[in-house]
Image (tube, grey):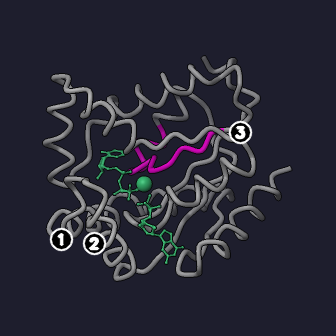
Amino acid sequence: MADKIKDAKIIFVVGGPGSGKGTQCEKVVAKYGYTHLSSGDLLRAEVASGSERGKTLQAIMQKGELVPLDTVLDMIKDAMIAKADVSKGFLIDGYPREVKQGEEFEKKIGAPCLLLYIDAKGETMVKRLMKRGETSGRADDNEETIKKRLDLYYKATEPVITFYTSRGIVRKIDSELPVDEVFGHVAKAIDDLK
Ligand SMILES: Nc1ccn([C@H]2C[C@H](O)[C@@H](COP(=O)(O)OP(=O)(O)OP(=O)(O)O)O2)c(=O)n1
Ligand SMILES: Nc1nc2c(ncn2[C@@H]2O[C@H](COP(=O)(O)OP(=O)(O)O)[C@@H](O)[C@H]2O)c(=O)[nH]1
Ligand SMILES: [Mg+2]
């Protein structure tokens, strides 16, 4: 496994709920042809399949909590293996959510060369999620769950950024700007890899 993807770049995309991770990842896919793997989307696909495992996941996500580490990691790993032969790079969106998830990812898969830290203010994220909730159909895009997701983000996920900052691979992106300007900074960070 590790050999199969050893030449591909691994980019972690980390930021609060509603910060704009998915929006920026789509643009990176369009420009650079990287493979976008959203851990949230993988989990939601499992829920949509109606499997027993999906039912358990649905209950956890509806509460705004984190699903067990091994579950998400196995899903990401399987998805990466499936694309390993054709992918020159992977955007791992919404993962790691806690330092331990990052450590396990590196043990089982490999090291990231870049962490894009998509940064928006708490009030901006809440506003965007409430708006998205009007059409997303996501069970977790409601006021109560959004608050829990934000709290968990500050408590569990922000330490991830500190952890990788000490390794020198974090690029902080101001996501309060208009989408295309945000993307300008994202593209710069990726171009600087070469
Ligand atoms: N590594 C992960 C990724 C996701 N989840 C769960 C908890 C999240 O609340 C839910 C949805 O994941 P998203 O990445 O979609 O969640 P965000 O809150 O970031 O929403 P989005 O990025 O789509 O706005 O899945 C998890 O437990 N562990
Ligand atoms: N104004 C503005 N809205 C954005 C920006 N990025 C994302 N959004 C909106 O915010 C919501 C959440 O974005 P999404 O990409 O799903 O964020 P994620 O939760 O981090 O994956 C969506 O409805 C987007 O349309 C941005 O840079 N500016
Ligand atoms: Mg998303």
Q: Magenta segment range?
A: 90-103
Q: Is 59 placed above or below 54 here?
A: below
Residue depicted at 14% across the width and 53% down the height: 63
Q: For residue 130, which numbered disc appears in the image?
A: 2
What residue appears at the point 50 percent right and 55 percent down from the top-left corner? 22
Q: Which of 45/21 is in front?
A: 45
What residue does disc 3 label? 9
Residue to which mark 1 is pinned: 143
Q: Mark 1 belongs to which amino acid?
A: Glu
Q: Nearer the viewer, mark 2 or mark 3?
A: 2
- Sooner in the amino-acid sequence: mark 2 or mark 1: 2
State the SS at label 1.
helix
Q: In which quarter of the image is residue 60?
A: top left
Q: Decide: few, some or many residues near mark 2? Use Cα within 10 Å; few <14, some 14-19, many ≥20.
A: some
Question: Is 95 inside the magenta-drawn segment?
Answer: yes
Instruction: Tell me the distance, in whole angstroms, between the alpha carbons under discs 2 and 3.
Output: 34 Å
Whether the residues at callouts 2 and 1 have beta carbons within 8 Å, the answer is yes
